[in-house]
Image (spheres, helix red, strand yellow):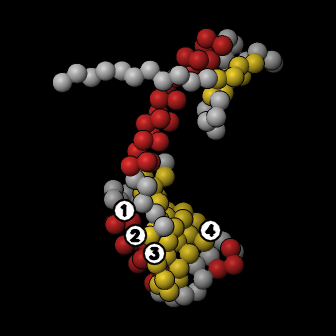
Amino acid sequence: MQQLNISLPWSMTYTDQPDGFAYVDNIEGLSCHAPTAALAKKRLRGPLRDKIADMAIQDSNSQRYIIGCNDGTVFLVNFQNSSWGYAQCGPNLNYGTAYWSPADNFRETVNHALSRAEDHGGTAWQQPV
């Protein structure tokens, strides 16, 4: 078996005004301050590699599940930031919370959200998204 590296082209924008700032084009949130474009490229390489790895994990965990409660609360189970969890929105959008689970699988996280739904009048409906 051989392990090979794949080189992917990526572009960044660099400005030296006022103190050197660079960002990766078309990927929100990847930026840095650096006095030179070469140093900016070096600083952005690691975070870009991490972002690509995270996107691959995200893609392989694309299941989503939505749960509606009798009091109007809604839960959305999904995979984000390298972990399973759910977002919760109260009736009339009057509050929102998020819970990122130590659970390492989709079904376990759905079951946790279903048990929390009981605190909100029980499950009125549920479906994969």
The amino acid beneath tag 3 is Gln
Please provide percent x and percent y for residue 111: 37, 72
What's the CA distance linking mark 4 and mark 1? 21 Å
Do the residues bearing badges 4 and 1 touch, measured as CB atoms within 8 Å? no
Residue 9 visible from this viewpoint: yes
Contact, mark 4 vs mark 3 (Cβ under 8 Å): no
Q: Nearer the viewer, mark 3 or mark 1?
A: 3
Residue at 49% of width from left, 71% of height from top? 66
In the image, is 49 to the left or to the right of 37? Answer: left
- x, y percent for residue 26: 64, 34
Q: What is the number of the mark on residue 114?
A: none
- Mark 1, residue position: 106
For mark 3, what is the residue?
127
Of pointers 3 and 2, the one earlier in the residue sequence: 2
Disc 1 residue type (three-letter): Phe
Near-viewer residue (52 or 17): 52
Secondary structure beneath disc 4?
strand
Specify whether 21 is left or right of 84: right
Mark 2 vs 4, N-terminal side: 4
Which residue has dot 4 on it?
96
Tag on residue 110?
2
Disc 1 crowd, CA 10 A, few/some/many (<14, 14-19, 20+): some
Q: In the picture provided, is 106 more to the left or to the right than 23? A: left
